[in-house]
Image: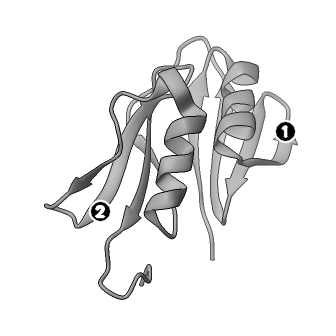
């Protein structure tokens, strides 16, 4: 089983380029007017539209803090904040804005044994 989350966008090429070049996602499938990206089994797509849908959060999970820190360096000025511990959810995280103004989160879980599950 798997799933795909889709978002409408007015700037598909720029958004897909950001997720591919900055985040490291792969273009999984090109369809007429839609591009589906994949990141470690997480699939999300962007489809041409007259309006941009930028609600919701795309969250990318890394195995450790170093991965989150590397992503903070890669997203550069798109980052809203520095990486930090969120004690409520026991995660290390930061938020950024993609070219559409959609929220992207980069995080790792702070499990005692370092595992994700």
Local secondary structure at mark 2: strand
Which residue: 53% across, 27% down? Answer: 76
State left or right for residue 54 relative to residue 89.
right
Res 90 label:
none
Closer to the observer: label 2 or label 1?
A: 2
Residue 44, compared with residue 115, is above or below; it is above
Q: Quadrant of the N terminus?
A: bottom right
Q: Residues within 10 Å of mark 1 (few under 14, many from 20)?
A: few
| Snapshot quadrant of residue 91 | bottom left
Q: Which residue is mark 1?
A: 31
Residue 67, compared with residue 18, is above or below; it is below
Furthest toward the bottom, the residue is 113
Res 91 label:
2
The percent position of residue 84, horizontal first and vertical second, equals 28, 49
Give the spatial CA distance, label 2 vs label 1.
Answer: 36 Å
The percent position of residue 108, horizontal first and vertical second, equals 41, 63
Which residue: 67% across, 36% down? Answer: 22
State left or right for residue 115 relative to residue 8.
left
- Please state the total of marks drawn on the protein image: 2
Furthest toward the left, the residue is 88
**Residue 63 seen anywhere in this rendered image of the structure:** yes
**Residue 60 seen anywhere in this rendered image of the structure:** no
Q: Residues within 10 Å of mark 2 (few under 14, many from 20)?
A: some
Q: Quadrant of the C terminus?
A: bottom left
State left or right for residue 52 relative to residue 18.
left
The mark nearer the N terminus, 2 or 1, is 1
Local secondary structure at mark 1: strand
Furthest toward the top, the residue is 50
Which residue: 52% across, 18% down? Answer: 52
Which residue: 57% across, 20% down? Answer: 99
């Amino acid at each position: 089983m798997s799933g795909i989350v889709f978002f409408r966008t007015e700037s598909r090429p720029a958004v897909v380029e950001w997720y591919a070049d900055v985040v490291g996602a792969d273009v999984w499938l090109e369809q007429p007017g839609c591009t589906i990206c994949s990141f470690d089994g997480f699939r999300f797509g962007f489809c041409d539209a007259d309006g941009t849908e930028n609600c919701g959060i795309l969250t990318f999970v890394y195995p450790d803090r170093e991965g989150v820190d590397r992503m903070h360096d890669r997203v550069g000025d798109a980052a809203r904040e520095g990486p930090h511990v969120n004690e409520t959810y026991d995660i290390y995280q930061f938020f950024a804005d993609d070219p559409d103004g959609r929220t992207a989160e980069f995080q790792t879980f702070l499990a005692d044994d370092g595992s994700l599950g």
